[in-house]
Image: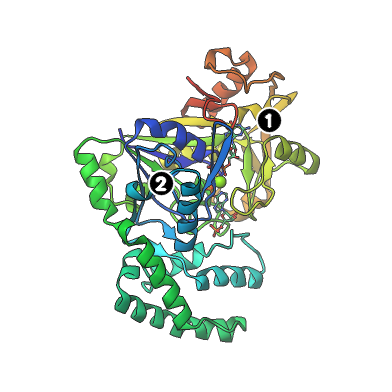
Amino acid sequence: MNTVLVGLQWGDEGKGKVIDVLAKDAAYIVRFQGGNNAGHTVVVGGSTFVFHLLPSGVLHKDKRCLIGNGVVVDPDVLLGEIAALRRKGIDVCRRLTISEHAHVIFPYHRILDGLRETKRERKIGTTGRGIGPCYVDKASRCGIRMGDLLNPSLLERKLKDNLAEKNEVFRNVYGHEGFAFEALYAMYLSFGHRLKDLVGDTAAILHRAVRRKKSILFEGAQGTFLDVDFGTYPYVTSSSTIAAGACTGTGVAPTQIDRIIGVVKAYATRVGEGPFMTEFPGIMGEAIRTKGHEFGATTGRPRRCGWFDAVMVRRAVMLNGVDLMAMMKLDVLDNLKTIKVCTAYKYKGKVFRDFPSDLEVMQKALPVYKDFKGWQETTSHLRSYKKLPPRAKAYVRALEDTCGAKVDIISVGSGREETLFK
Ligand code: GDP
Ligand code: IMO
Ligand code: MG
């Protein structure tokens, strides 16, 4: 069974936890897009792990982990993550392969990410990890790929070409001194040297896995509304975060995908700028942020919080072809007297039941809410769906109905065991 798992909101839905839970039934876990803008949290036996590039199934010691061609890789961050796990007694090297076609993030990408943000009148609030500029180079065909780090003369030529053009831009547009070739070249040759045994043809590995009927779990990063095509553009990331990205980001064909799992929070959050139709006003936002520990796993920024937006999630279910949903952080709503769900938007006298494509509507529309009575009981200790308070079940059922997909997994805490299967 080959499963693609994606976020249906603006990221941080709890994908890392679900991947860790589902990984026991998979032989391969593969990241297919994004880079270390992602922060995926896994909590096992009281220890917390945050993965930025390594697939979140890596804690299962018998699983093959892959980083697909659609990912942008900062080798320094990757090596750091591998070393941090080794210090905790987990060696991933013999079961990790990184696509030779994955593009490499250089310091000039990171710096440019920051400089562009400072120049922009309307900021995106990127993670500053160089993700956007690296994907720009990929699309404009000057990018440097993981395989290139293993070929000194090719790397030299490509890096020189890049610096010749980029240093002009750094100096003339941004007043930045630019980058010297020698130091960068030595640094990236050394990264290549240290990673050489891990770089390979991940598409071929996955095709072999498909032929042998081994289960593959595709781990999405970010969320549907950060997708470069279907998200709240321009307030998005630079990759295809929807399920279809799993195919282009790994080389596995759509015909080989068996099911799509969409991960949602029982409410909504967003980090960075951009429209957020159901965002809480100040004090309520603070309360949920504190209860749900809503701070970015990558940048530590406070996440903006709001009510569940069924208009959005309905569209995400459609865009991803979601078969099943995992609903996360239900416990965060435990104390609330009333819980609201957005079922439509209103703008200039018009009611929008479908997600609008116009940024102005997204920014200015008012949400139409349906109220639900809160269950006002603790749920984190529960280990069976049947034991959930009736009002919590009614909330989940109502979301299934309005979003058009069944919920199969309900999460009531960050730990592996705090997971209920319907
Ligand atoms: P991801 O990027 O989608 O993997 O999500 P993040 O790891 O960035 O953010 C999700 C956060 O919620 C992490 O801190 C998780 O440990 C935590 N979490 C996941 N599921 C639950 C849950 O059901 N309840 C609570 N209270 N926290 C959860
Ligand atoms: P995970 O995988 C939440 C947001 C940034 C910013 C926008 C563009 O943990 O769900 P980028 O650095 O990608 O160019 O920033 O996207 N963003 C995320 N928000 N979770 C993420 O990843 C994110 N990755 C990027 O905050 O608004
Ligand atoms: Mg995250």
- When the figure is inspected, residue 187 is found, relative to residue 182, above or below; the finding is above
- At a point 28% along the width and 47% down the height, the residue shown is 252
- When the figure is inspected, residue 32 is found, relative to residue 393, above or below; the finding is below
Assign the N terminus to one quadrant of the image: top left
Q: Amino acid at mark 1?
A: Lys
Q: On the picture, is 137 further left or further right than 349?
A: left
Q: In terms of image quadrants, where is residue 102?
A: bottom left
What residue sits right under mark 2 in the picture? Answer: 91
What residue sits right under mark 1 in the picture? Answer: 340
Q: Is 331 or 46 nearer to us in this picture?
A: 46
Q: On the picture, is 351 further left or further right than 182?
A: right
Camera sees residue 10: no
Percent position (x, y) of residue 342? 64, 35
Which numbered dot is residue 368? Answer: none
- At a point 51% along the width and 83% down the height, the residue shown is 167
- At a point 38% along the width and 72% down the height, the residue shown is 189
